[in-house]
């Protein structure tokens, strides 16, 4: 099956940004102003996202990874501490735990949502456990009530890596203010983009204040002691984001609901066809959530076919992916923490048959039909 992509057009990526003239004008306006970083757009963006998500405070940073690192620091993750998390995620979720000197203690998933299995969480709690770091996989919120209940019982903090879930809803409430610290990423494949960027949302004023200090080298100003005066009690980082990135974010946020609506339409088109194909398992949405659908994953029942199907789709000009190689299979995690193959049977079963199909708001109905046709043929 050839598409004109061989003539240089028509490749369908698994995800991509949608930047329009308004976005570009918003960025250019800031570039021509006096403040290209640490100006008024940072706070405007923080307030806009916080308001959209129904949360008190937002702190914008340079990436989702920086947002995770900053969250783990304010959560008090220190050398020797354990953080319960899932291995089916982008590396940064666990890497930043390790970066704080902590140990990621992995837990298996639920096979329908690919999220953390709350029943498995409690079994892994020890005296050293400080927090639970969850991921709303593909945009589908985790079992937040169950996780929060366990956290409350054992006095643990919940950090929610919601990089996939900006605009998702759990029991009628938008993701962002449900857990202690929620983080978003604004990488171009995510729901909205700043080029690079991230944000931490919280309802906790102390966390908010510490996050702002951490973002800027740990510097605490005290004007009473003089206009020049500042002190550093604990060294921080340069996790700052620029004003023109935030201008892009503000402009993008205005289109988020439209983006999500289109993502949901595409998912419905995929589901309608794939539910009748015996060889594939498709993602489901539970009745009490609304997913923002960051990615559309399928799982082949016969993992022996994954490689062939993947390669055939690639050859047809379709930018398939696999989200993700389980982290405990990575050499570092095996060596450092002793994780082994088959430690997490459900994660592995998913991974063996997993393929991510294209999904982004600018994808046309024709593109969706093409992907469906190519998948059917490849099977
Ligand atoms: C994208 C992503 C991140 C990292 O975000 P960056 O902005 O690329 O640093 C972290 N966790 C998950 C689950 C992600 O999808």
Image: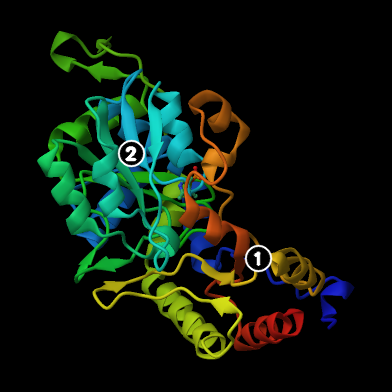
Compared with 9, 62 (above or below) is: above
Locate residue 372 relative to residue 126 in the image: left or right.
right
Quarter of the image for residue 214 reads top left
Which residue is at 30% across, 38% downward? 124
Which residue is drawn at the image coordinates 50% and 90% (left, top)? 272
Label 1 sits on residue: 303
* Whole-number angstrom distance, CA of label 1 to CA of label 2: 28 Å
Q: Residue at x 40, y 50 (%)?
A: 108
Relative image position of residue 38 (x, y in whole percent) = 38, 35
Q: Nearer the viewer, mark 1 or mark 2?
A: 1
Residue 84 image label: 2
Q: Is residue 130 above or below residue 371?
A: above
Q: Quadrant of the C terminus?
A: bottom right
151 and 75: which is toward the camera: 151
Residue 141's quadrant in the figure? bottom left
Residue 126, visible in the rendered structure: yes
Viewer-nearest residue: 160 or 53 = 160
Categorize mark 1 by other alpha carbons within 10 Å: few (<14), some (14-19), many (20+): some
- Quadrant in which the N terminus appears: bottom right
Q: Relative to 124, is 113 above or below?
A: below
Q: Position of residue 119 (x, y in %)?
A: 26, 53
Q: Secondary structure at mark 1?
A: helix
User: Does any portion of residue 242 appear in the rendered image?
Assistant: no
Q: Is residue 40 left or right of residue 177?
A: right
Residue 241 placement (x, y as % from top left):
44, 39
């Amino acid at each position: 099956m050839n598409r004109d992509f061989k003539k240089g057009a028509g490749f369908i990526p698994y995800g991509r940004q949608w930047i329009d003239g308004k976005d570009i004008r918003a960025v250019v306006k800031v570039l021509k102003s006096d403040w290209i970083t640490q100006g008024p757009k940072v706070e405007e963006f923080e307030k806009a996202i916080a308001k959209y998500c129904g949360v008190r405070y937002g702190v914008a940073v340079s990436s989702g990874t920086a947002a995770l690192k900053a969250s783990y620091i304010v959560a008090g993750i220190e050398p020797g501490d354990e953080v319960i998390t899932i291995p089916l995620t982008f590396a940064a979720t666990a890497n930043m735990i390790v970066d704080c000197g902590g140990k990621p203690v992995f837990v298996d998933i639920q096979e329908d949502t690919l999220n953390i299995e709350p029943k498995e969480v409690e079994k892994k709690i020890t005296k050293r456990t400080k927090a639970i770091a969850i991921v709303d996989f593909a945009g589908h919120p985790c079992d937040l009530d169950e996780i929060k209940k366990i956290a409350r019982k054992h006095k643990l903090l919940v950090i929610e890596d919601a990089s996939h879930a900006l605009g998702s809803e759990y029991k009628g409430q938008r993701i962002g203010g449900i857990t202690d610290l929620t983080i978003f990423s604004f990488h171009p494949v995510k729901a909205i983009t700043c080029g690079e960027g991230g944000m931490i949302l919280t309802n906790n004023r102390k966390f908010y204040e510490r996050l702002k200090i951490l973002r800027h080298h740990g510097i605490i100003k005290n004007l009473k002691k003089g206009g020049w005066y500042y002190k550093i009690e604990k060294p921080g980082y340069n996790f700052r984001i620029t004003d023109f990135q935030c201008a892009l974010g503000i402009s993008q946020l205005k289109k988020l609901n439209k983006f999500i609506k289109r993502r949901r339409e595409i998912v419905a088109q995929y589901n309608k066809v794939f539910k009748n194909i015996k060889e594939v398992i498709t993602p489901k949405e539970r009745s009490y959530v609304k997913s923002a659908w960051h990615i559309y994953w399928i799982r082949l029942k016969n993992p022996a076919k994954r490689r062939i199907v993947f390669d055939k789709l690639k050859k047809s000009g379709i930018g398939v992916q696999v989200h993700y190689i389980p982290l405990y299979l990575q050499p570092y995690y095996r060596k450092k923490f002793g994780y082994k193959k088959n430690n997490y049977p459900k994660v592995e079963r998913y991974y063996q048959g997993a393929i991510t199909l294209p999904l982004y708001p600018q994808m046309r109905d024709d593109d969706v039909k093409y992907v469906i046709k190519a998948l059917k043929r490849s099977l």
